[in-house]
Amino acid sequence: MTTVVLTRPEAHSQRLALALSRQGFESLVLPLMTVQPIPVSERSPVPDLTAGVVCIFISANAVQYGLPHIASALAQRETAVLIAVGQQTQSALQAAGFAAITPEQADTEGLLALPALSSGALEQALIVKGEGGRALLASELRRRGVAVTEWSCYRRCWPPVDLSPLSDAGRKWIFQASSGEILSRLVALISEASRLDLLQHPVIVPSKRIAALATELGWQSALCSDNASDDAVIATLHQQLTHETTP
C-alpha cells in the first residue's frame, strides 16, 4: 500500500487528505509548517490603495490574512486589478467576491509573464504576502519601472516534527511538498533523524524549479505536478501509480 505524506499546514493537509480518501488513496498528515497572522504591533501599516493599482496575492494565506484589511478599499477602486498566483488563491478571492487574473504557470515566473505585469503596463503594484519568501517578483517589477509595495500579513512558523510515523521501512511513501521552503525543511528533518533512506521515495512538487531543488537536495525521484492545487496533486498520483503498474 502506498501512503501519501502531506506536509502542508494542518487545515490544508486535512482538506487534501479528505480528497485523497475519496479517490482511494491512503494519506498521513504530517504538517511541517504553521501559518499565523502577524500581530498588529509588528505588522506594517495597511497600505493605501491608489486608483489603478495592481494588487498581487501571493498565496491563499495572503487572501485569508490580508484581504479583510483592504477589501473595502479595493471595492471602491473599480479600476484596481487583482492577480492571484494560482487557482487556490483565485478561488479564495472569488469566494470573497473579487475576480482575479491568474497565470498559466502558478509561480513567480508565471506571474512575471502576465501581460498585466509587462514593462510599461503599470505604474504601481501591491504584493500581499507572507514574511520572507522569494524576492524575485518585487525586484523584477522594480526593474521594469514599477513602484512596488510589499505588505506582509502572515508568517510561516516551523514547529518540531516527529518523524516516527515514517518508521515502517517496508511501506511505500510518496511525499508532497508544495513549496521550496517546505521541501528544504523536510530534507533537514530527514537528515536530523538519520533517515536518508526516505529520499529514495518520490516527492510531488508543484513546479520544475522546485523539482530541480529536490534533485539538488538528494531526492531520487521528483514528480512535477501542474501546480500546487489538490486536483493537480491527485492527478500526479494517478499518473505515478499507473506508471508503476504498467508492465
Image (spheres, rainbow, N blue to C red):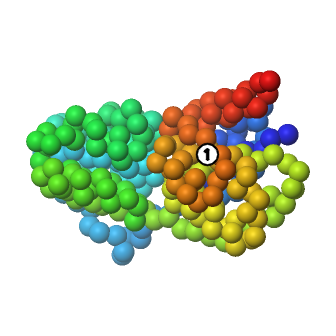
Q: Nearer the viewer, residue 24 or 181?
A: 181
- Residue at the image point whose x is 16% and y is 37% from the top: 79
x and y, in percent, of residue 165 in the image: 81, 59
- Residue at the image point whose x is 42% and y is 56% from the top: 65
Can residue 9 be seen here? The reply is no
Q: Nearer the viewer, residue 52 or 232?
A: 232
5 up-or-down from 194: above or below: above
Q: Residue furthest top?
A: 247
Q: Which residue is mark 1?
A: 222
Question: Image quadrant of residue 40?
Answer: bottom left
Q: Nearer the viewer, residue 188 or 16?
A: 188
**What kind of residue is marked 1?**
Ala
Q: Residue furthest bottom?
A: 41
- Residue at the image point whose x is 62% and y is 30% from the top: 235
Q: Residues within 10 Å of mark 1 (few under 14, many from 20)?
A: many
Quarter containing the C terminus: top right
- Residue at the image point whose x is 41% and y is 61% from the top: 133
Question: Image quadrant of residue 66?
Answer: bottom left
x and y, in percent, of residue 221 in the image: 65, 46
Q: Label 1, secondary structure: give it.
A: strand
x and y, in percent, of residue 246 in the image: 77, 24
Q: Nearer the viewer, residue 155 or 162?
A: 162
Q: Is residue 240 left or right of residue 53?
A: right
x and y, in percent, of residue 207 in the image: 49, 43
